[in-house]
Amino acid sequence: MPSTLDHIIPTLDDATKPYVQKVLHAAEQFANCALLLDENKLLAEQNSEKRTRKASKSTVIGQAKVMSYEDIVHAPAEARRKEHQTCCAVFAWAKAPSCGVNEA
């Protein structure tokens, strides 16, 4: 704001200059205060959202495992092996012939 009014201040008489500068300084401080209040309001809203999120209970619906590329590649073979073991165990329990899958 001072840069816009710099060309007006030199044209004022000596008695008026301090008053104009005081008003300009007050306007600048008022603008700074408004900006700080706006920022404070925004931060208070963010803090309130954090409290709400923190207060709500989280529901665990299952467990997850972080898998590497090797785990992903070997997972289908491991699943087939476990399925085969389960199948053979059921046939053995029922004293039935083998499940028909070649043992790996």
Image (cartoon, rainbow, N blue to C red):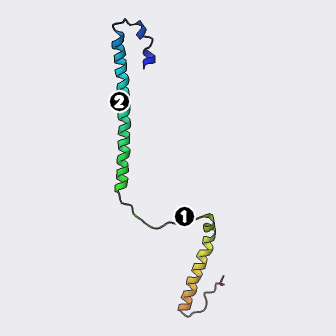
Q: Residue at x 43, y 66 (%)?
A: 61
Label 1 is placed on what type of residue?
Val
Residue extending farthest to the bottom is 95
Asked which quadrant contains residue 33, the reply is top left
How busy is the neighbourhood of tag 2: few (under 14 within 10 Å), some, or many (20 plus)? Answer: few
Horizontal relation, residue 36 to residue 80: left or right: left
Which type of secondary structure does the marked residue at label 2 adopt? helix
Counting from the top left corner in percent of width and height, residue 43 is at 38, 41
> 83 or 22: which is nearer to us?
22
Which type of secondary structure does the marked residue at label 1 adopt? loop
Q: Which comes before the other along the chain, label 2 or label 1?
A: 2
Counting from the top left corner in percent of width and height, residue 38 is at 37, 35
Label 2 is placed on what type of residue?
Cys
Which residue is labeled 2 in the image?
33
Q: Residue at x 35, y 12 (%)?
A: 18
Vertical placement of residue 97 versus 63, above or below: below
Quarter placement of the C terminus = bottom right
Counting from the top left corner in percent of width and height, residue 69 is at 62, 64
Quarter placement of the N terminus = top left
How busy is the neighbourhood of tag 1: few (under 14 within 10 Å), some, or many (20 plus)? Answer: few
CB contact under 8 Å: marks 2 and 1 = no
Horizontal relation, residue 102 to residue 11: left or right: right
> 84 or 51: which is nearer to us?
51
Which residue is labeled 1 in the image?
66
Which mark identifies residue 14? none
Q: Residue at x 61, y 89 (%)?
A: 98
Q: Residue at x 52, y 66 (%)?
A: 65
* Count of number-bearing discs: 2
Counting from the top left corner in percent of width and height, residue 11 is at 41, 6
Question: What whole-number distance in Å separates the C-alpha atoms at marks 2 and 1?
Answer: 49 Å
> 78 or 43: which is nearer to us?
43
